[in-house]
Each structure stands twice: as C-alpha cells, then as structure tokens.
Amino acid sequence: MKQYLLSMYQPQGEIPPPEVLAGVMRDLGAINEEIKQAGGWVFSGGLHAPETATVVRFADGELLTTDGPFAEGKEHLGGFWIIGAPDLDAALAWARKITGVTMLPIEVRPFRDRIEG
Amino acid sequence: MLPADEAGEIERVFRAEYGRAVAVLVRVFGDIDIAEEAVQDAFATAAQRWPSAGLPPSPAGWIITTARNRAVDRLRREASRQDRHAQAALLHASAKPAQEGPVRDDRLRLIFTCCHPALAVSAQVALTLRLLGGLSTAEIARAFLVAEPAMAQRLVRAKAKIRDAGIPFRIPYDADLTIRLRSVLAVVYLIFNEGYTATSGARLVREDLCAEAIRLGRLLAELMPDEPEVMGLLALMLLTESRRPARSTPDGGLVLLADQDRGRWDRGLIAEGHALVRRCLRRGQPGPYQIQAAISAVHSDAATAADTDWAQILALYDQLLAVAPTPVAALNRAVAVAEVSGPAAALPLVDELSLGGYQMFHAIRAGLLRRLGRAAEAAQAYDAAIALARNDAERDFLQRSRQALPDL
C-alpha cells in the first residue's frame, strides 16, 4: 500500500452559501467513510483561510516572522487528506470522487516513506 | 549463414520482440529499469552467441528466459548487499505465478502504463516508442528534434514518476477503459502524424515514425480486436500511408490529393484499410477514427479526383462533427461543402472558425478566395499560411500557389 497526499485547492474569497456547503460536507463525510471502509484512511483536515497564515523564514542571517501565506495566489490549500491506496489509479479514483462533490481541483502526490496516522 | 545475415536477423528479432520481452519482465519484476537493462543484456549476449551458435528455436523465448535469469542473478548479488530496491524486485518476481512465457496482455498493460494520463503527452510518446517500439533514446530525440540529453531526461523523469507515484501496470477497469484507450490511440496517432507531416525541418515525411505507429496500431488491433476505434485508427493510418508514394515529387515537393498520380497509391494497404473499415461499419459503433477512415476510404475508391463522391464525404463529415465537434473537422467539412455546393457556400463556414494559428485554415481559405476571383485576399491568406508552414516542402508548395495567383 502506498500513501498519497490529496490537496484540495480552493479559490480566494467566495465561500458557497451555508445550504450548499452543508450538502458538500455531508457528501465528503460519506466519501471519508468509504475510504475508511476500504482501509485507506490515515487522516484529513480542513484549514482556516490563508489570511490566518504566518510564515517563518531565514533571511539576511536572521529568523523573520511575517504575516500572510508563503505564496500569494488566486487559489490556496483549503484542506487535505492523507490516504493509503494500492496504486495511483486507486488514489486518483478517490480524488475524482472528492472533486465530484466539491468541484475543486485535487492534487495527488505520493509520499516518500510510510507515515503513521 | 553469413555473419551479416545473422546480424540482420538479430536486428529483426530485436525490432519484433523487444517490446514483448520488456513487457514480460516488467510484469515479473515490477520495475521498468530492471526490465530494460535485463532485456538489453540478453540481446547483447545474443549478439555474441548467435553468430557462431546459430539462432535458438524460439529467439523470443530465449531472450525472455536469458533476461529473467540474468536479472535474478544480478538482483541476488545486490540484495545480499542490503539493496532494498533489489530485494523488492526479487520479492515481486517470486510472488508472481511460475508462468514465464509471454502473456498476451503484457504489452497491453505496458501500453496503458506508458500512456497514463498522469504523464505529459510528450513523455507518453517517448515512453511508448522506447519501451514498446525499442527505439533508442537517440532515435526518439532525432525524430522529435530534441537534444538527446533532454530526451534522456524526459524518459528518466517519466519512469521515476511511474515508480514513485505508483502508476500501475494494469489494463484499466471497464469503467475507465474507454477514456484511457482514447489517450493510447491519441499517442499512436500523434506518432503517425508527426511522421506524416514533420513539424519542422526540411523533409515532409519521416517514414520511420509512420512505420512505428502502424506497427503499434497493428499490435493494438491484435490485442484489442473488439474495440472498433482501434480498428478505425489502424485503417485510417493504413489508408493515409497508402498515398505516401504519390504525396511528394522526386525532389521532395508536396502534391495535394487532387493532383496525385493515383496509380502510385499502394493497393495492398488500401485493400487492408478498406477491409478494416467494412469490419468497423458492421459493428455499428462509429467513433472519430472510424469515420475519418471511412472518409479516407471514399477518396481511395475514386479512380480520379473528379470521380470523388463528395456528397458521401460531406455526409461522413456531418457524422464526424456529431461525435467529435472540433474546429479542424469543421474546416475539413467546409472543403467538402466547396466541392458539393461551390466555394461561395464554403467560405462563410471557414470564416466563422477560430483557427487563426493553423496553417491549413489559411491555405484552405486562400484556395476558396482564389476560386472566387478574390486574388488580393487570397494572397494575404497564402502569406498567413506560409508564415505558419511546418516544413520546407509545405512552405515551397504554398509559395508556388501564391505565385500562381492571377496578377493583382
């Protein structure tokens, strides 16, 4: 079993109305349950908006702390899953399901080494 | 037998069996690099041994067995030095069923891996030519006018992604098969088209790429005989290829379909293509490749350009647009409209297409404007086409057409 990071990218700003969001969250819950049933669950999480981010970096010989996300962009990482799957096709099948209910692009990336949930 | 014949024979076995051998060993070891290295090893041994010992009864079987045994020996040595990669490959090999002969599906699995949509199309093409076609990195680089180190890097990256991301060696499940097959067929057709109209350079055609694409098309047709689009693509390539001898002048100039010496068309390829088209039609599941093959077959049926059944071609283009509405198909349909109803009916259909970056759009527009007596506009359209020409033969042809316009 390989492990994959599924990153969900969402557009800046607009948040769907609560009644739409509730339906999406319910569908995502069902997909999470399916991933668990398939034995692929490691963990997942949703993130606060990028304005809440803080970056620490090393520059000019000192550690700097600055407000804001590392990369400004039209899209940002909104949430992620770490899942186990036998191969990329299986991981892509989960990504397709998630995109199907959220309409958001999902990036699928393999982990180098096994991580424990 | 003379050594030269033996060398030719080894070369022939290599071309015919390389892909099969790599595919079998990828199944056994679950790793492309190990498979390629082992097969190359085995062919190197064959090149030393066969000239004196003669060809074994089953050259392909000999190559596969030798490659497997040598790879196992090498991996055992490496595994004993705690090489985890070698240990994993050995484990994979021992977990596989004892069957060592080629499984019909091995090459099919490998084609689907090479053409996986998680790989860039340029990498899909390079991997397919390398692993299934047995072309060297240098040959692929030459065919696509890419520097050899860049092509080598493209292949290394693609193979690393297959390994690291876990792209499986598997024929896709039914639900995915149709869409995944589409990308396999697109890769083969892209190889053919690159061969048929070289996108740059002096020459119009690179016969080796056409031949390789047809070989892959035949392989797919053998492995997936129930897929009508597979038959359709093979038919389309064979019918297009049948006209190659008539498509250029001795000095390499381009000759349009209407002006070709039809006596020079390859009747054998035409007969084979027609038989495939008829087989497809009987299945009643038309797709873009089948319809394009059928259009090509109508051209092949005409003894002279004037005998062409344009009404039938137009009907087929209508069908093509219904299943695959692309601007290029609409442009080709407009050509048929010009033949059926005249250039005045076709020009507005061409003008509404957003194909300004496509050489054929301007060339076809130029031809229609010329026939309508609008020479000045035709000259402008030829200039636009010349600026977009992909090789010297096309450029020369367009320049001659422009010069042949009546005085402005």
Image (cartoon, coloured by chain):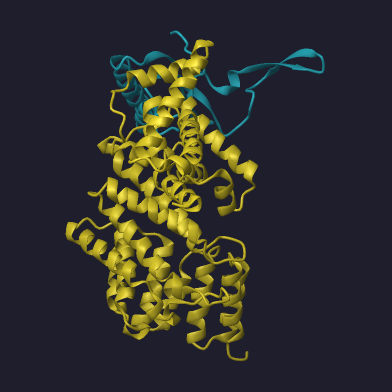
Image coords of residue A18 (percent x, y): 38, 25
Residue A41 vs residue A60, the one in the foreground? A41
Residue A91 vs residue B141, the one in the foreground? B141
Residue at the spot 35% in from the left edge and 66% down from the top edge = B239
Q: Is residue B192 left or right of residue A32?
A: right
Q: Is residue B7 left or right of residue B302?
A: right
The relative height of residue B22 versus residue B388 in the rendered view (above or below) is above
Q: Can residue B288 be seen from the camera position used here?
A: no
Quadrant for residue B238, please give it.
Answer: bottom left
The relative height of residue B279 versus residue B47 in the rendered view (above or below) is below
User: Which residue ends up furthest to the right in the rendered image?
Assistant: A60
Q: Is residue B224 left or right of residue A84?
A: left
Image coords of residue B313 (percent x, y): 31, 73
Q: Can residue B347 be seen from the camera position used here?
A: yes
Image coords of residue B30 (percent x, y): 41, 26
Quadrant for residue A84, please give it.
Answer: top left
Image quarter hosting the C terminus of chain B: bottom right
How many numbered marks appear? 0
Residue B369 vs residue B148, the one in the foreground? B148
User: Which residue ends up furthest to the bottom in the rendered image?
Assistant: B407
Chain identifier of the cyan chain: A
Image coords of residue B12 (percent x, y): 43, 50
Chain identifier of the yellow chain: B
Q: Is residue B325 left or right of residue B82?
A: left
The relative height of residue B96 versus residue B386 in the rendered view (above or below) is above
The relative height of residue B225 versus residue B386 in the rendered view (above or below) is above
Quadrant for residue B180, please give it.
Answer: top left
Residue at the spot 33% in from the left edge and 49% down from the top edge = B219
